[in-house]
Image: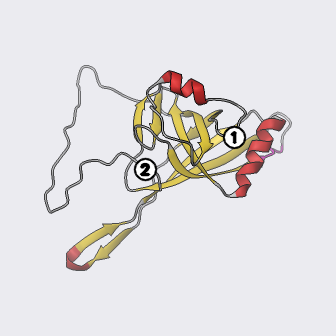
Amino acid sequence: MSVLYLPPCPTDCASPQQPVSFSTCAPEYHWGEVSAVYVAPADLLAFDLTDLDEWLDRLADTGDDMIRTLIGIGDMPEPEVVEVPTSGDRKAYSSRQYTLNFTIDETNDVNYAWMAMTGCNTNYQFWFETSDGILYTGGPDSGLEGTAVFHQVIPRLRTELVTFIGTFKWQSYFAPYRIASPMA
């Protein structure tokens, strides 16, 4: 499971609420499309995710302990969660299974080798960025930890691109931590 920011959940029967903010005149919206995923070994050491220099020191297309930048198009649908009825008319909930769908359309030999390695069933640490510059992470100093599995899709028509289509999956009780991306 990923190490994620934990909201201040009660440990008793209290039901505190976090503040909310809605604006009639200047609402804040965030747009869809995951445009980049940053992938590293699962054991990459923590660092300050808000510091661009720390990112730049770690971003590289080669090197075993470096963070790879994947460019593509993706989305994160609603996570799967199981509701289990328990005694006393209570309910228990499983951790959420998150899935990030991602398509890579630059299918050169180097990227093909990366895609093929996802068949090794290893864990990765990853971060993903939306087109409006929001970076989703596992917390203030770590990525999400989970699996990545990609496959090549060859279309029937000559006028369509070959793509690598895959998923990043992780489990957590809470939504991913998010910050303004220092790379945006």
Work out whether residue 154 can be spotted: yes
Q: Classify mark 2: residues with Cα within 10 Å, few (<14), some (14-19) or many (20+).
A: some
Please report the bounds of the magenta region as a residue range.
Answer: 152-156
Name the residue type under label 1.
Asp
Viewer-nearest of discs 1 and 2: 1
Which of pointers 1 and 2 lies earlier in the amino acid sequence?
2
Instruction: Pinpoint residue 139: horizontal percent, then vertical percent.
Output: 41, 42
- Among all residues in the image, which is located at the extreme bottom? 87
For the stretch drawn in magenta, what is the main secondary structure?
Answer: loop
Determine the secondary structure under disc 1: loop
Which corner quadrant of the image does residue 75 belong to? Answer: top right
Residue appearing at x 17%, y 46% in the figure: 17
Instruction: Pinpoint residue 91: horizontal percent, then vertical percent.
Output: 28, 70
Q: Which residue is mark 2?
A: 3
Instruction: Pinpoint residue 182: horizontal percent, then vertical percent.
Output: 48, 23
Q: Point out which mark residue 64 bears.
A: 1
Q: Are marks 1 and 2 in contact (CB under 8 Å)?
A: no
Which corner quadrant of the image does residue 85 belong to? Answer: bottom left
